[in-house]
Amino acid sequence: MLERLESYLHRYAARKRAFPNHPRDSPRRARRLLDLLGAPDRSLPVIQVIGTKGKGSTCAMLESILRAAGRRTGLYTSPHLHSPRERIRVMGLPIPRPAFSGGVCRLLPLLEGSLSWDDLGPATLFEGLTALALEHFARHGVEVAVVEAGMGGRSDATSALTPLLTLLTPFSLDHQAYLGETLAAIAAEKAGAIPPGGRVRSAPQPAEAWEVISRRCREVGADLRLAEPAHPEGLGLAGRHQERNAGLALAAVEALCEQGWELPEEAVERGLREVRWPGRLEVVAGGPLTLVDAAHNPAAAQALAEALRENFSQRPRLFLLGCSADKDLAGIVAALAPLADAALSVRARHYRAADPQVLAALWQEHGVPAEVVPEVREALCRARAWAGPSGLVCACGSFFVVAEVREALGLAVREAWPEPVVWP
């Protein structure tokens, strides 16, 4: 299966170089794949979550609430940490290996057939996984699916779906090469997914983004309401920024109840209390306290810095940082540098990984002693030895670094999955 999938990715890359497929057609390609699979999404209530930061946490909270209320849930998120099966969950559990292998085997002929789609261009792997997720949900009796958009909005594969409810997490600068160089351009891309007559709940946004969102909702007659941050007792995810995500999840609950859903208050409280989402301000070891966080843009790095200030006083504090090359590296380091006593720069196991020498130089510009240790596992050992029993190590900058740290500590095992040949 993997060999055939890798073969497809190489053929996809060659086809794309000769006949580029436009990102704006991604929903149409995903829609075609879904229809070829029997349109499994047509009778399934879908809640789409779009934004720059907090999407995964918001999805996890809402799914946990719905599951606690007795609903049979589906959850589709990206990217994954250790296994692509994490992306597709029913009742909180990743799709089993046999079901995933079977689904990919059903999907592969459709992907290969897409190489001859002269009108739309070949389907991406993300478009294929989106279709596979919805098929799996339909096969397993899911009653409601919480679906996280990828990096976009109107040009995202998940916008092939017709959502019952659209949730907007905060917008900020990220993926500018694909979404636009300004916040207004990014907001237009993301808000462009709001369907005519849709129900929209949004976390607080920068004024520039809110103006774009409001205008889009007026144009298409969508019901837009602001979701204020919430302060639930015993929230299962740490950090003040999670209160913003909790507020959005609770706004979704309110919107569903307005449509006749029964979601008891006790279930809502239990769902928020029991939610877990690896890689988000997650404590993975003690002595020294070791945290991982997938913060991979300046806004997320700032939220991480605030959470560390408020919740973790351990010193000395060392950052283990590895990022993708297309990120705002200077902005990420600038957000974290005031808290750092030292830093190690690493290269994550990803073809788009940033040069750790560049990261080390950025730390040094802020007066933070920094060294390059190319391998994450070695860097983790050195960081923990340097911090000592009373210190703190924070590994961050990308999902790939988070995954490697968790695997090095024996918390998970990596499953093989082919890398894209071109991106996206």
Image: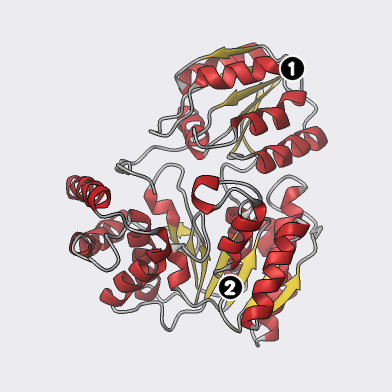
Mark 2: which secondary structure?
loop
The amino acid type found where label 2 is placed reads Ile
Whether 371 is drawn above or below 405: the answer is: above
Query: Horizontal and vertical percent for residue 367?
Result: 73, 14
Q: Nearer the viewer, mark 1 or mark 2?
A: 2
x, y (%) of residue 139?
A: 34, 74
* Residue at 45% over, 30% down: 353
**Residue 181 coordinates in the image, percent (x, y):** 59, 48
> Count of labels shown?
2
Question: Does residue 165 appear left or right of residue 353 in this picture?
Answer: right
Instruction: Name the residue rendered at 71%, 45% in the picture.
Output: 238
Let me know if residue 263 appears in the view.
no
Per the image, label 1 sits on a secondary structure element best described as loop
User: Vertically, is 180 above or below 198?
Assistant: above
> Is 296 on the left or on the right of 43, as rendered?
right
Residue 113: quarter of image: bottom left
Quick one: label 1 or label 2, which is nearer the N terminus? 2
- 243 left or right of 290? right
Residue type beneath disc 1: Pro
Q: Residue at x 75, y 74 (%)?
A: 225
In whole angstroms, how far apart are the C-alphas of marks 1 and 2?
46 Å
Question: Vertical placement of 327 versus 386: above or below?
Answer: below
Instruction: Examine the image and state in which quarter residue 199 appears.
Output: bottom right
- The relative height of residue 65 versus residue 418 in the rendered view (above or below) is below
Q: Label 2 neighbourhood size at 10 Å, few (<14), some (14-19), many (20+)?
A: many
Residue behind mark 1: 316
Residue 187 can be seen, yes or no: yes
Residue 10's x, y, as percent?
22, 45
Please give the residue where the numbered disc 2 appears in the rendered image.
Answer: 194
